[in-house]
Image (cartoon, rainbow, N blue to C red):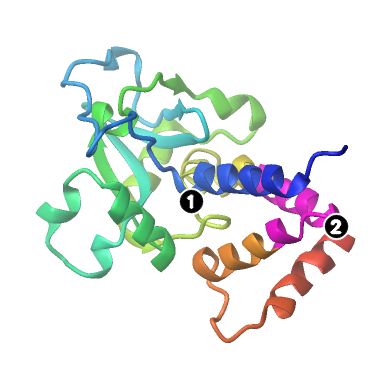
């Protein structure tokens, strides 16, 4: 007998949503956030101002622009900038609750953190995306200045304005997200599998919550753009 594809498709969709949301998976049995490494954990002497820093994780990649002096500018979904102007509160490490609520409310902040807080114990790749933009790499100082100008509250979208869009705009002059492309391919694959009805419903619900579809929109209306996009 053929295995039911619905649970597999739904699981894959959830994985891709987590990839774009940048949720930090907590250790088993943990009751809160894992403390970041102590200052000095990373050797920043090899980083140059304007470098694009990339932290691969199990389900996603997080990106930032190095500003020098152990500072990294990066975009994080965060609900707090939309409800308070207290910089001291906003600058505290973003918890998963703040992050998820930021995704739902489509708000974020471009914040400046230490390398330790940015990488959160992960390994760091430097300018790893340059190979995809050989003739588009801007000057290092230009990249850093672009990042600094964008520091503060901003709109957020899983598909159209995430941390990868931020860094590619700063370093290459055009906002691009390969993670978004992979997510869209996954959605197409799920929709093409007519047996994955439940997974398609999950796509519609995710559209309502994360992509800003009006609550009054019916499910059939939600799916029409997906089918048109697939057919195109």
Q: Which mark is residue 194?
A: 2
| Residue at 68% from the left image edge and 46% from the top image edge | 7
Q: Is residue 101 above or below residue 180?
A: below
- Left or right position of 24 against 179: left
Q: Dot 2: what SS?
A: loop
- Left or right position of 39 against 208: left
On whether residue 30 falls in the magenta region, the answer is: no
| x and y, in percent, of residue 198 in the image | 70, 59
- Left or right position of 87 against 182: left
- Left or right position of 107 against 92: right
- Residue 232 in view in this figure: no
| x and y, in percent, of residue 36 in the image | 22, 28
- Check disc 1: other Cα within 10 Å, few if <14, some if 14-19, many if 20+: many
Judged by its main secondary structure, the magenta piece is helix
User: In the rendered structure, which segment of residues is drawn in magenta?
Assistant: 182-200
> In front of the other: label 2 or label 1?
2
- Quadrant of the image for the N terminus? top right
Q: Which mark is residue 162?
A: 1
State the residue in front, 135 or 99: 99
């Amino acid at each position: 007998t053929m295995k039911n594809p619905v649970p597999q498709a739904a699981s894959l969709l959830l994985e891709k949503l987590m990839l774009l949301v940048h949720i930090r998976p907590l250790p088993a049995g943990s009751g809160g956030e894992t403390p970041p490494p102590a200052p000095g954990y990373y050797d920043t002497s090899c980083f140059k101002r304007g470098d694009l820093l990339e932290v691969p994780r199990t389900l996603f990649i997080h990106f930032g622009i190095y500003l020098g002096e152990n500072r990294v500018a990066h975009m994080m979904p965060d609900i707090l900038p939309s409800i308070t102007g207290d910089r001291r509160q906003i600058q505290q490490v973003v918890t998963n609750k703040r992050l998820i609520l930021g995704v739902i409310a489509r708000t974020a902040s471009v914040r400046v953190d230490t390398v330790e807080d940015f990488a959160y114990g992960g390994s760091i790749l430097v300018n790893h995306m340059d190979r995809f933009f050989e003739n588009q790499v801007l000057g290092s100082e230009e990249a850093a200045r672009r990042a600094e100008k964008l520091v503060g509250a901003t709109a957020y979208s899983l598909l159209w304005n995430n941390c990868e869009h931020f860094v590619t705009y700063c370093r290459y002059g055009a906002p691009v997200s390969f993670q978004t492309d992979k997510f869209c391919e996954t959605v197409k694959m799920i929709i093409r599998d007519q047996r994955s009805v439940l997974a398609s419903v999950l796509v519609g619900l995710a559209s309502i919550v994360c992509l800003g579809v009006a609550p009054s929109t019916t499910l059939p209306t939600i799916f029409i753009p997906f089918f048109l996009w697939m057919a195109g």
